[in-house]
Image (cartoon, helix red, strand yellow):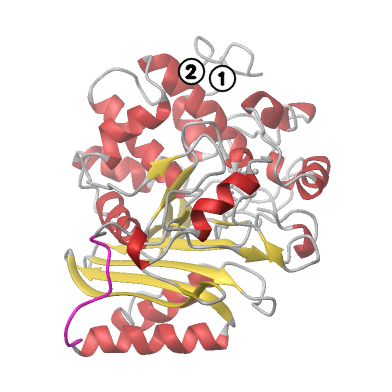
Amino acid sequence: MTHTPLSPRTRPRARSRRALLCAALLALTVQATAVAPALAEGPGGRGGSDCVRTQGHLDGKGRRVLDITRKAKADLHLNAVQVKVTIDGREVLTDALGESMTGVPAEPDMQFRAGSVAFAHISTTLLKLVEERRVRLDDTVERWLPDLPKADKITLRMLASNTTGLHDYVTDPEFLKELEAHPFRAWTPEELVAYPLRHSFWYEPGTSWSYSHANYVYLIEALEKITGVRIDRLVKEKVTGPLELRNTHNNFTPEIPRPVLHAFTSDRGLYEESTFWNPSWTTAPGAVITTDICDLARSAQGVGSGELLSPRSYRTLLDPGTVGLGGATTTCPATICLKQTEAKHFGLGVIVVNGWILQNPSFSGYAAIQAYLPSKRLAIAVSATKTATTPDGNQAEVVATRIAAALAPGDPLAID
């Protein structure tokens, strides 16, 4: 569900198998019923959304961002691009280019799958619970996760920062084979974690770093047991509600709230629609989210600025002890245990790149990025969908990188 600069790209097998969390970090035979509402979407069905194109004359920065986005759409052969940029919370540009489907223009308020953005919300929720003294980051998890091997050595901090040593099911060939063959399958958490549990840990918990979606499947279960509250309700109480992310929703089925930005992919070798592939594999139930570009920009600002956190918690969000971890060992290759540096590292559910704080979901034809640069109070949100000739990789990142180079040339958003 997540393509990060610190982890292998989440691709099923070769690129032709990319039904991906990180993802996808995200599939039911309700496709037929789910498609009907999406086909009915249109200007008359939007109900007065407040996520609309920038009105009136664009200033120099807004015009520059629009020109960059238009050129990137053409260069990358994208089907649609949604973009929102703010500085200190003030709009620079909100727009959407291209089509959702043939003959249906893309609009800013169209909803898309946001995958690993949920991890940024969940980690912020965890830190809020720590501030409330309901739990400690370094509590081991055996009381909540008794079936997890090494639970007496694994802490909440390790789950949230990807330092447990658990394998990632999203890179397991057997999992990828099943996902490619059955993109509409509904997965349970037990089925997902069964894949990493077939393997030995890459390293002793807390001693290195490696990306694994299984960490957040387990973290969600632990948070639900700690609080007695379902994760979607808990995150709404702690994060999405206070940030007023009114169009960010958890979904327990492949449904996407209208209006829908449709997705297409060549993950299985044939360019096909993937909008309603089941995203249940990307993480645990209650944290499979959709959003719009305006909420994504607000999420970038709220999470990236630490708006909801104390200064101490914010510092932990950005570096929970991951800097300096990783690197090849006799038991873990450098492609898995990626070196975490001050310039590029994983925090608690966020990625830090040259001062930018971001998340970058890419799976099943959807690609997005939320990125925030605290030094300039600059938030960039981009969502993109593919044509049959779009290059491999998260192309929303490419668009955002070009925008960042124009607005903050001294702070490169150099993700790869």
Q: Which residue is mark 1?
A: 153
* Residue 303: numbered disc: none
Q: Look at 44% across and 15% down and name the residue there.
A: 225
Is 257 above or below relative to 49?
A: above
Q: How many marks?
A: 2
Q: Which residue is mark 2?
A: 140
Question: In the figure, residue 102 lies in which quadrant?
Answer: bottom right
What is the x, y in percent for residue 293? 36, 62
Residues at discs 2 and 1 in contact (Cβ within 8 Å)? yes
Instruction: Please say if 243 is above or below 192.
Output: below
Residue in the picture at 21% in, 65% down: 377
Please tell me whether the stretch drawn in magenta is mainly helix, strand or loop: loop
Give the quadrant of the C terminus: bottom right
Q: In what element is the residue under mark 1? A: loop
Image: magenta residue range: 50-58
The amino acid type found where label 1 is placed reads Lys
Query: Is 179 or 192 nearer to us in this picture?
Result: 179
Q: Secondary structure at mark 2?
A: loop
Q: Is residue 10 left or right of residue 174?
A: left
